[in-house]
Amino acid sequence: MKKTSALLCVALLSSAAHAAVAAGENLLINGTFEAEQVDFPEFWTPSSSKAVSFQRTGGPEGRKAAVVLRGGAAAPEEASARQQGLTLVAGGTYRLSVFVRTKGFKSRNAGLIVHNSGWISDVGLKTFPADSEWTFLEKTFKLFPSKGSEYGVALFAVDLRGEIAFADVRLEAVSEDA
């Protein structure tokens, strides 16, 4: 009996080690932007720009929170909110998804992307209309290499005018090797 129990424990622990990520699990920490007693969602770093804000209400389909990048009419802004230090597998297939809303939005370069160490390469969602209600967007991709298998995720806009809001950001492993 003891031998059977021991073998069962070893088998369970071994299978748990191989299945570190469950199907449909969000690999981002706090992708729903929960922030009860802080000014900005934990695990996300806003740029020092005044153009990054957090809204506790007003998200799509009953979701509460959104991170908003907003540029002024007088001078274009650069804005970002990032999550660094993700360990992912190059060659694995991933899905990035988000709800996005835009108002008078215009940017030279903007998006929700996964980037490698040093932000040499990136992939993600980079095309948005000038004005839209909350819209669900997603992209499935094969991941490129990164030094130390370390990656980051960024919500960003360069030369931003108007606003773009992001809610319920998700990064999911699609293939078994991811």
Image: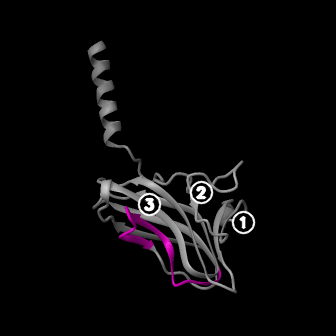
Residue type (three-letter) at the residue carrying disc 2: Thr
Q: Quadrant of the C terminus?
A: bottom left
- Residue occupied by mark 3: 152
Q: Earlier in the sequence, mark 1 or mark 3?
A: 1
Q: Position of residue 31 (x, y in %)?
A: 55, 57
Residue appearing at x 36%, y 70% in the figure: 120
| Mark count | 3
Q: Nearer the viewer, mark 2 or mark 3?
A: 3
Dominant SS in magenta: strand
Residue type (three-letter) at the residue carrying disc 3: Gly
- Residue occupied by mark 2: 32
Q: Earlier in the sequence, mark 1 or mark 2?
A: 2
Q: Which residues are magenta?
A: 103-124
The stretch drawn in magenta includes residue 104: yes
Q: Position of residue 165 (x, y in %)?
A: 63, 71
Q: Position of residue 175 (x, y in %)?
A: 32, 57
- The image quadrant of residue 4 is top left
Label 2 neighbourhood size at 10 Å, few (<14), some (14-19), many (20+)?
A: many
Q: Are marks 1 and 3 in contact (CB under 8 Å)?
A: no
Q: Earlier in the sequence, mark 2 or mark 3?
A: 2
As helix, strand or loop, the secondary structure at mark 1 comes to loop
Measure the alpha-carbon separation of dots 2 and 3. 17 Å
Is 44 rendered above or below residue 7? Answer: below
- The image quadrant of residue 40 is bottom right
Left or right: 65 as drawn, with respect to 135: right
Measure the alpha-carbon separation of dots 1 and 2. 13 Å
Q: Nearer the viewer, mark 1 or mark 3?
A: 3
Measure the alpha-carbon separation of dots 1 and 3. 26 Å
